[in-house]
Amino acid sequence: MTEQRARVVFLVRVPVPRTEAFLAAYEQVRHLVAGGVPGHLVDQVCRSSTDPEQWLITSEWATLADFEKWERSPEHRDLVRPMRECFTDARSLRFHIHAQTPALT
């Protein structure tokens, strides 16, 4: 069986006064990850429409093993530290992608 693509979801809380620092740190992480972490496909950062301190970060990976290898690396810890310092709470979820609607053309 071939490995399935994976979606990683982080639900985080960022106090409003830390929003600019959080978004600046996210910009650094996303550009470096998108530019060269094997298996990384896409990511998004989303803010709750009803709670300005609730954020959702999602990323899609070729395989869950690709994400886990990246997550265990010293580079990952160093790179995400400024972003994590903005969190007051964080929850991580990992999923294998079972099915998806066709992409829009």
Image (cartoon, grey):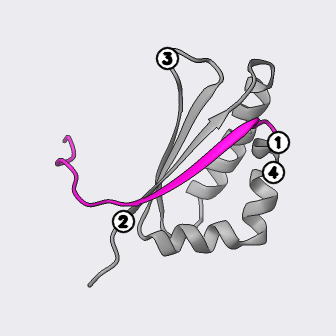
Which mark sits nearer the N-terminus, 1 or 2? 2
Q: CA distance from mark 4 to mark 2?
A: 26 Å
Task: Mark 1: give few (<14), some (14-19) or many (20+) Cα within 10 Å.
Answer: few
Report helix, strand or loop for mark 2: loop
Q: Which mark is residue 49?
A: 3
Report helix, strand or loop for mark 1: loop
Residue topped by disc 4? 81
Q: Which mark is residue 85?
A: 1
Amino acid carrying label 3: it is Ser
Q: Quadrant of the C terminus?
A: top left
Residue 39 in percent (x, y) is at 48, 68
Amino acid carrying label 4: it is Arg
Residue 46 in percent (x, y) is at 52, 31
Give the left or right position of residue 45, taking residue 5 as reference.
Answer: right
Task: Mark 2: give few (<14), some (14-19) or many (20+) Cα within 10 Å.
Answer: many
Residue at 71% in and 45% down: 28
